[in-house]
Amino acid sequence: MNHTPLFLKWAAGLVLVVLAFVGTPALARNEPLYFALEVRRDGRLIAQPKLLGESGRILRAERRIPGALVPDYSLVLTPKGEGNSFRLELDLTLPEAHGHSELALLHGQERKLQLGRVPGELEVSLLLMKVDSPEFRALMDLGEDNGTVTSASCSM
């Protein structure tokens, strides 16, 4: 019995599966993402959430004082991978205001969004990073307190 045709069919099928997987950009798969936000209302800082999510999945966050009926803020992020960038929908709701924005961001890019009716009324600064990246690991190392004190001096 000749098994060559069966083997060739199996190998061709395997190659197609591998090519389909490799041909799909990494960003199209659910890639872990880090979001750092600053929310300002009339220039006053009211929130600084730092969130972990995934491309292709809706991320919801809210801050609520225990027992309060209404949250201080409610945030919905919808990130989608598009080649080397990310398409992001952002919805922010405060008790007295609401804002929506759609934007494209690159890994490591920070943007300032005006969500209010007038500049400065409701603004969000947003940083997006891929979790498995050297830049993200460097950011997390900077945020750690090793208990060491360093000093720098500058002379002219």
Image (cartoon, rainbow, N blue to C red):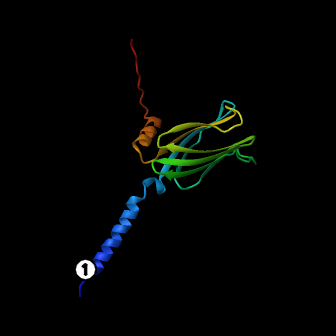
Task: Give residue 125's quadrant in the image.
Answer: top right
Question: Disc 1 designates what residue?
Answer: 4
Q: Where 123 sits versus 64, above or below? A: above
Residue 105 in the image, given as x and y percentages of width and height = 52, 43
Q: Where 11 sits versus 28, above or below? A: below
Regarding residue 116, the answer to whether it shows in the image is yes
Q: Secondary structure at mark 1?
A: helix
Residue 16 in the image, given as x and y percentages of width and height = 36, 68
Dot 1: within a 10 Å radius of its alpha carbon, few (fewer than 14), some, or many (20 or more) residues?
A: few
Residue at the (43%, 54%) spot, across then down: 26
Left or right: residue 141 compared with residue 3: right
Which quarter of the image is occupied by the C terminus?
top left
Left or right: residue 5 compared with residue 48: left
Regarding residue 54, the answer to whether it shows in the image is no
Residue 46 in the image, given as x and y percentages of width and height = 66, 36
Of residue 114 and residue 62, the one placed in the foreground of this image is: 114
Residue 77 in the image, given as x and y percentages of width and height = 60, 49
Q: Where 5 sits versus 121, above or below? A: below
- Name the residue type under label 1: Thr
Q: Where 52 sits versus 7, above or below? A: above
Residue at the (25%, 80%) spot, across then down: 4
Residue at the (46%, 46%) spot, across then down: 130
